[in-house]
Amino acid sequence: MAVREKELVEVQSDGDRLADGAGGLLDRVIGPFRRGLPPAAQPSTGFYTDTTVCIGCKACEVACKQWNQLPADGFAWTGKSYDNTAELSATSWRHVKFIEQFTPNRDTRVPLDLVAGGSPENRWLMMSDVCKHCVMAPCQQACPTGAILHNEFENVYIQPDICNGCSYCIAACPFGVITRAHFDGHAHKCTLCYDRQKDGLVPACAKACPTGSIQFGPLDELRRRARERMEELHHRGVPTAYLYGESDGSTYSALNSFYLLVDRPSVYGLPDEPFNPWLNMAGDYARSLVGALTAMAILVAVFLILGR
């Protein structure tokens, strides 16, 4: 408190600024339009989520809500699983998914013979889902106000005070991560605990995870660790283990929050082949140009015909 009081003493009052004459007045006029110095670039950080050791405790969900002061989602069961959050939203930046798989001879939702690596044994998959913090983020490309950016840690960050609630980012995201909040109309999602990272702290969800399923750190280190874990699982008899989003694909960039999975992405509610809408823009522009030229040609023809 003493430090803050000292800072306040040093702040000039409006009267002091006016007393500075024309220079002070000019500073008040153009000051708000000056750009501040960007923070120095830091090593790229992200999440590596090992779904094979997730126990579904939801400690990550609770830690995320507590640290970011997000409202509760209520206590009503969805009727689909042991879950009350159901999906990622503006008030749930972490969501633990429960995927129940049983053999076909039982009343089941997902028979094992319909998924990769079918087994005669029952299985319950769990995955802590979060924003993917894409290297080339469609939400950022679609944002008309510049509210979405990559910060100095290369994490995708939404500035709520600049967001105008247009929802273009919601339509652009192939993972269904972003939604608008009912309390302010702005888009919200995981910030990768930007405030904690700036102070050298681990994100709240990774700090609270009791099994190490959620791992945080420099991306190069996470990728090395994930490949070693995948090879270990292969040697231990889990040939279906693979990394999702660890590297660039043909239609999408790498993810700064990637996963180790043991079944098809669609089983976990992830797109099998995520597609960046930006790849269609060249064709959209070409069709728009052709349509505009055709309309102009028709209009000229009509004027020529009526002018005779």
Image: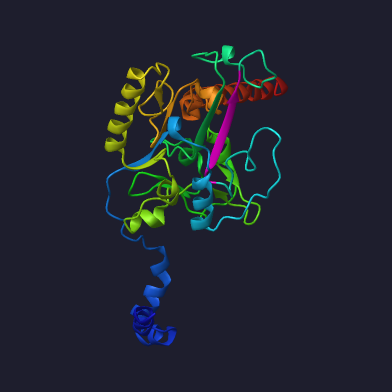
Q: Quadrant of residue 210?
A: top left
User: Is residue 109 shown above or below 37?
Assistant: above
Q: The C terminus is located in which quarter?
A: top right
User: Is residue 47 shown above or below 185?
Assistant: above
The answer to which of 137 and 131 lies nearer the viewer is 131
Q: How many marks?
A: 0
At 34% across and 85% down in the image, what residue appears?
Answer: 20
User: Is residue 291 shown above or below 8?
Assistant: above
In percent of width and height, residue 164 lies at 57, 52
Q: Is residue 177 visible?
A: no
At 50% across and 43% down in the image, what residue appears?
Answer: 143
Q: Quadrant of residue 225?
A: top left
Q: Is residue 192 visible?
A: yes
The answer to which of 31 and 262 lies nearer the viewer is 262
In percent of width and height, residue 72 lies at 62, 53
The answer to which of 292 and 2 lies nearer the viewer is 2
**164 left or right of 44 in image:** right
**230 left or right of 170 in image:** left
The answer to which of 155 and 143 lies nearer the viewer is 155
**25 left or right of 266 in image:** left
> Which coloring applies here?
rainbow
Q: The N terminus is located in which quarter?
A: bottom left
Q: Main secondary structure of the magenta part?
A: strand
In percent of width and height, residue 184 lies at 62, 56
Task: Please tell me whether residue 61 belongs to the stretch shown in magenta.
Answer: no
User: Is residue 81 shown above or below 112?
Assistant: below
Given the current orientation, which residue lies at the most extreme front position?
Answer: 121
In percent of width and height, residue 298 lies at 65, 21
User: What is the span of residues highlighted in magenta in the rendered image?
Assistant: 93-102
